Amino acid sequence: MSKSIKQRAFVWLDERFDLQPLLKMMDHKRVPIHSHTIWYYMGGVTLFLFLVQVFTGILLLMYYRPGEDSAYESMKFLLTEVKFGWLFRNVHAWSANLMVLFAFIHMFSVIFTKAFVKPRELTWISGFILLLLAMFFGFSGYLLPWNELSFFATKVGTDIMSAIPFIGDAIKTLLRGGEEVTGATLSRFFGFHVAILPLITTLVLGFHLLLIQRQGISETSEFKLLPPEKKRYMSFFPDFILRDGLLWLIINIIVLYLAVFFPWELGLKADSLAPAPMGIKPEWYFMFMFETLKMIPPHVWFIEGETFGILLFGVAALLWLAVPFARIGRKPLVESKWITILGLVTLSYMVVFTIIGYL
Amino acid sequence: MKLSSIPILIKILSLSLVCIFPMLLMGETEVNTCVDCHVENDLMPEFYLEEDVHQHAGMSCAGCHGGDPTAEDMDESMSEENGFVGIPEKQDIPAFCGKCHSNIEYMRVYQPRIPTDQESQYYTSAHGKKLYAGDERVAQCSSCHTAHGILPAKDTRSSVHPFNIPATCDQCHGDTKLMAGTGHGTNQLNDYAKSIHGVALLEKGDVGAPACNDCHGNHGAAPPGAESVSHICGSCHLNNFEYFKTSKMGQSSTSQEYHNCEQCHGNHAIMKPSDELLNFTESSLCMDCHSEDDAGYIASAIMYSHIRESDSLYQEAQLRMHDIQIKGMNDVDIQYMLKESKQNLIQLRTLVHTFDAQQVTQKSIEGKGFSQQAIELAQQEIKEFNGRRMGFGIATLAFVLLAIALYMKIKLIDKQKSNISS
C-alpha cells in the first residue's frame, strides 16, 4: 500500500518536473575507491558544519541584540537564562572553528591529490573564496559578543587593514564604520555576519556544489592510470551519501562533546576606555599571519614592515588562487614535483607559525 | 631688490636687536656670592639640595639669613647693615620660619590656600611648649623638614611625605638617649610598622593609611587624651565611632577614663581585629569588669556566635561559588548574593560597636540569608551541570545507535551488491 503511494507520488511529481533525467544522473554518479578516498569526505564535513552554523545561528539570532548596550547583555541572558541557550552558543562557536579547520584540510587534500587540475579550476577558485568567506565569518562573529578580548582583537585586526597601500585606511573605516571600534562597528559586523556573508556564501557555495555535481568526483592521477578492470567505484547515491552521513553523525557527537565539556567563556564586557587586557590573540586561523607580521622588521627596504607583510599575503593568496594555471617551463605546475613541495612548505609554515603564536 | 624694501629691512634688523639684546643680558646667571664662597671653602650646609623648595621659588640664602648676596666682600655681604642674621638659635627657629610662613599676604603668592598657622599651632604642641620653656632637645621646624633640603610634602623624597613620616619621627622618638626621662617609649616605629596601618602605608604604599601625624597632628603634635582617642579613630572609622559613642559601653568607658578604642585595639601596634576579641576567656580584657553570666557576658556570647555563623556560612558559599566557576557554570547571581553577604559581614563587625546583641542578631540573620541563597543557587547550578552531562550522555547514546544503524545499513547494501555481482 505504502509502495503504491510512493510510486503514485513519484509519478505525480515526474509528470510535472521531469525527474527521470535527474535520477539517471544520480544513478551514474560514482566515487572512485582508492587509498585516498577518505579525503573526498572533507568537503562534505565542511558543508555539514556550515549547515550546523546556519541552524544554530538562526536560533542565536532569536535572542541576540546588536548594540553597545545590549550585545553583551543579550549574550549573558542567552547563556544563563535561555533554555539550551548555552548549548547553541557553544555548538555555534565550536562548529565555526571546526568548519574553518575542515575547510583547510579540504583545501590541502585537494592540493596533495591534485584535484584542482583542468577542468576543475573554477571549483578550486570558488573553494578558495569560500575559505576566505569562512575566515571573514569568523572575524565578524568574534566581535559580536562584545567582550574585552574580541573588542581589542577587532581593534588590532582592523588596524592591520590600514597597512594596505592606498586603500587601507578606507577599508579600515569601512569595516569600523568610523575611526574607532565602536557600536557602529558592532552593527556593521552584525550586518556582515548575518546578512551579507550568508548571501554571498550561499551563492558561491551553490556554484561550488553545482560544479562538483556537474563534473563528478575527481580521480587521482594514479587511479586514472589503472586498467579499467582494476578501477573500483562506489555509487554516490546511496553508498557515498550514507558514509557521509555516518561521518557527519560522528562529527556531531564531537561538536556536542566539545560544547558540553569545553564551553567558551563570555569574558568581561568590552570597555573602550579600559587598557588592553593581557593575551589578546586573533582566532587561531589568523595566527600564522599575525605571527608573521610581528616578526617582520619595522622597515623592509623602503616599505613599512606591516605593509610589506600585507602585500606579501596578498600576492601569496593570488598565487595560491592561480595554482591550477601555473606552469614551470613548458610543464604545468601540477605535473612537476614542485606542487607537493609547495603544498608541504605552505602547510608546514602555517602549522609552525600557528604553534609559535601560542607558545 | 627694490629700493623701497630697504627701510623695511632696517626696521626688522633694529627690532631684532632691541628684542635679542635684553634676552642676552637676562641669560647671565644671577650673582650669589654666598654659594660661591661656601662652595670654595667647602662650607656648604649639611643635606643641601639644589631642588630645595625655597630655592626653586627664587629665594636665595639671603631670603632667610639676610645679608647681601651680590657683594663680593665677605664682611660687606655678611654685615648687620645688610640685614645678616646668620644661623638662628634653636629656640628662634619657629619665628625664623614664621617670618614668611605666618604671613598670609606673603604666602598666598605661592599658594592661594596655604595655611599660615603652623607657628601658632606649634606652640600649642608638646614640642612647642617645651621649646618655649627652654628645652632645646625637642623638635622644631628643621628637625622634621630639614633646613636646606626642604621638599614639598607631596614629593616622595621629602622627609614629611607620608611614606617617610614614621622614619622622620623615629629619628628622635626612637632615640633612647634623647627619650630618656621623658616617659615615652622608643618602640613606636617597630610597633607601627607591624600594625595594619603601618603595613598598609609602608609595605602596600597606601597613602590613605594613617602615618604618625594623622593621629597625633603635625605642627600641633600632642599625645591624644583619653577623650580624643575615639574622635581621632572616628575621623576615618566613622560608623564604628558613631555606634560606640551612643552605646552604653561608650558612655561608661568615657566616664571611667578608659581609652575607648585603644582599650581593645591598642595604639601603635593596632592589628587587624579578630572576632576572637568578642570571645570571652579568663584572660579577656572584658573580664576586668564583666563576670560570667552577667548581661554583658551573655550579649558578647550571642554576638560572637552570630558573627562566627555568618562568617562560616559566607566561607562555605564562597567555596561553592569557586566550584561553580571551575565547572564553568553561571555564577552571576551567586556573585551578587555573595557581595551582599560580604557587605553584611562588614556591617555586622561594625555593628558590634553598639554592644547591642539584638541589633547584631538581626543583621546576622539577614546576612546568613544571602549566603544561604548563594548556596542554594550553587546547588541548582551543580544540578544543571550534572543534567547537561546526563543529557549529553543520552544524546550521544541516541546518536551512536543511529550511527550503528547507518553502518549496518551500509554493510547490508554492500552485501546485497556483492551478492548481485557474484
Image (cartoon, rainbow, N blue to C red):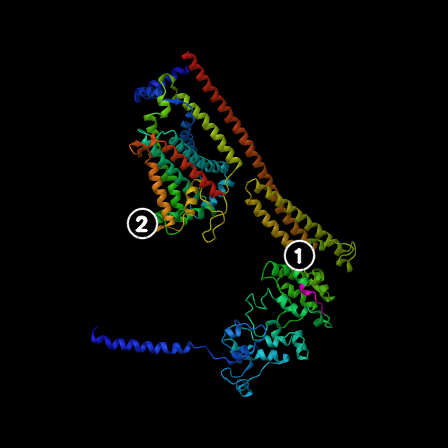
**View extreme (bottom): residue:** B81
Tell me if residue A188 can be seen.
yes
Q: Position of residue A187 (x, y in %)?
A: 39, 45
Q: Residue furthest left?
A: B2
Residue for point 71% across, 67% down: B185
**Residue B117 pos. (x, y %):** 58, 75
Q: Residue furthest front?
A: A329
Q: Amino acid at mark 2?
A: Phe
Q: Is residue A195 placed above or below A250 in the rendered structure?
A: below
Kind of element beneath mark 1: loop
In the rendered view of the protein, which quadrant contains the N terminus of chain A?
top left
| Mark 2 secondary-structure assignment | loop
Q: Which residue is mark 2?
A: A166
Query: Of helix, strand and loop, which mostly describes the magenta segment?
Result: loop
Amino acid type indicated by mark 1? Lys
Q: Is residue B180 left or right of residue A246?
A: right
Q: Are marks 2 and 1 on the same chain?
A: no
Give the magenta part as a residue range. B184-189
Q: Position of residue A99 (x, y in %)?
A: 43, 34
User: Residue extending furthest top?
Assistant: B422
* A344 to the left or right of A267: left
Q: Is residue B322 left or right of residue A334?
A: right
Tell me the residue that label 1 is attached to: B272
Report if residue B186 lies within the magenta region: yes
Q: Nearer the viewer, residue B267 or B422?
A: B422
Residue B36 within the magenta-colored segment of the rendering: no
Q: Chain of mark 2?
A: A
